[in-house]
Amino acid sequence: MGQSQISYNKLEALLKMKSENNPHMELIPIGESTKGRVIWCLTIHKQDQLKRKTPVLLTASLHGNESTGTSALLRFIEKMEEENELSFGLLEDLIIYCIVCCNPDGYQEKTRFNGEGFDLNRDFLTQSQPETASIVKLIVEKKPVVVLDLHGYVSKSTSFIGLIEPSGPPHNSSYEYDLFVRWALPLAEHIESCLVSKQDEFSLEGFKNHKGTCIPYRDGTRGWDDFSPITCTNYSMLHGSIGVTLETPSKTEDGVEWHFQSIIAALQFSAKHHKKLAENLTKFYDRGINRHHPTHPSSHFPRYFVLTEKKELHSSFYSLTQHLVKNGITTYMTEEEFTDGHTTYPKGSVIVPMNQSLCNLAYCFLSKGENASSSKEKISEFCSWSLPLHSGVNCYTIFHSIHVKVKLVEKELTQEGMPLEFITGVDHDVKKIGILVDEGLFHKKAHAGLKMALKEMEIPFIELKAKDLLSGESLSPIDILIYNGYEHLFYTPSDIRSTYEELVLNSRQQQEMCQQTIQSFLKTGGKIIGIGAGAAKALTTTLKVSPVKVHTSGWNENALLNIHYEESNLTLGYDKDDLGFVYRPAWFSNVENMNVIASYSKDPESLLCGYWPSFEKAQGAPAIVTNKTGNLILFGLEICFRGHTKYFYRLLWNAICL
């Protein structure tokens, strides 16, 4: 039996009623979703002027279709309404922050993503979405010692159900992992022990007879790592929190109970060890302030990062500076030019000192990152995260003391909302844009990053589904069609899992009709831009607009790397040897009748950071190609990925406008 789920309006009303009727509960709005729904934080605490309480954060429904966490938190709140032994025991030492639903739009629509199609639990690095920014603001302000993020649905075996972090290797080198795991592992094992002892509370046989849970750090589960800082708990670890994701086994009432019992167990553990947990967080801060990192090489952390503008990209420079400040990172701006070694830094450079409590977070944001391609373990997600490289900002490291006049950066000094410099001077209004969208293949909206990029560049567009191309007239209102998504959008039901049948075409005949529409559009002067492996494969294999052969690497493989750009209108604004980004990397062959606009470097050292074990297959191969008339452009690169890759938006602008 599946769990029941109330509407978001009813959820809000319920939270308001509970907070109004209980002196220990306070409901505060912390932000809004993309569609304007309020995100609420319910604080549960007992006022005691003589005692400082230890903060703990509980989050649920970052993925809107994983609502068991929200139901479990409601059950927990009901339990805390009673003046019982549990509530007295927990509130004596803890202050508990509950974001009962982090993704109101996804929760209401029963989708994994938010109202703009973004997976919020992949957004904690750039915080491009308002929901994520709201949670980050709370973490920065409240400094929780423990963060529990409730998800579903995972069972690695019939006997060991659900999953509780800490994760397996590789671990992000920005973490103070010894401080984290000394508490995260005992916490996970305590939760597991309590779940086993509560078997009588469950109804289904799988829950009543389980022997434990999966704890990846202990059990060696492959493909579940904490290398990337893009999730809620992995981000919180960079603040020194014991961040733990809990994956309930199923979307059933027992799945809700599993989360509920896990919450109780985790909070009891936190209350019992609250002083030592607080001391652990203080040790994390002290390591940063005193530049004492016993598990890191002495050369790991520089004394300073220095940021300067690259190619007069003012908006990128100020946006990154503001991002640092919003995340609680102490940041200064120079009031004079200064020289260090052979490098002269202009007035207005940004300096980030690394003798600060959040130096680990600053290092993760600003360092080049790591090339994990030789890792024996598979990396499960996005891991080439350097914000300066993705933003188009120069970033330097200094390993000794410097003396320069500076001022502390305040938020109002960072010029938020500055226009992207490269979008001026071209009248794009005459170009009518259409983009191909999907409604959730593989629980994602792959075109979400494209939509965000177009909106930031103020380029209007209309949305088209694959089935819209069945009509030969469907493309008549537009001049340019852009496709950034999976090739599966043009599959038929026999080619794809039944879960996604409604999102694809109905038959081979419909494939042929779409093929005719696309080919006719191209022949009559329309422009088609395909971004990434999926679009390139669909356009060449299913829709047959070009004989180009598309080669792809693994689904989650990704990297920042050096790219060789040819001189052309498409590459205006980039150096001959500049940066590129790949996610599910793609490269091309059979390009004799095409123009090669960019190629992967032949130098194996050109892969700067990320995870691309088979990079040697693509070395020297074309990365961007066009047909001879220039109205078909295929990018093997990802140029508008999840709001990360703003340095590469100019490639999209050039492709549209020039």
Image: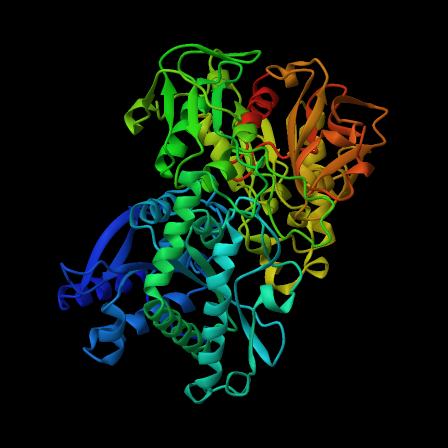
Pick the front one: 596 or 219: 219
Where is residue 128 shown, x and y percent of the image?
43, 39
Residue 366 x, y percent position in the rendering: 51, 33
Image spot of residue 343 (x, y percent): 55, 13
Judge from the rendering whether residue 456 lies leftward or rightward of residue 513; answer left or right: left
Give the quarter of the figure containing the C terminus.
top right
The residue depicted at 27 percent of the width and 77 percent of the height is 86
The part of the image, by quadrant, that contains residue 11 is bottom left
Q: How many marks?
A: 0
Q: In terms of depth relative to the viewer, which is nearer, 176 or 81?
A: 176
Q: In the visual, does 528 lie left or right of 2?
A: right
**Can you tell which quarter of the image residue 520 is in?**
top right
Which of the 4 image quarters holds residue 458?
top left
Colour setting: rainbow
**Residue 430 can be seen in this image:** yes
Is residue 477 in sight in this rendering? no
For image coordinates 79% across by 40% down, the residue present is 551
Height in image: 52 above or below 356? below
**Residue that sits furthest to the bottom in the current view:** 200
Q: Whole-percent x and y of residue 368?
A: 59, 33
Q: Nearer the viewer, residue 469 or 333?
A: 333
Please tell me whether residue 405 is drawn above or below residue 457 in the rendered image. Answer: above
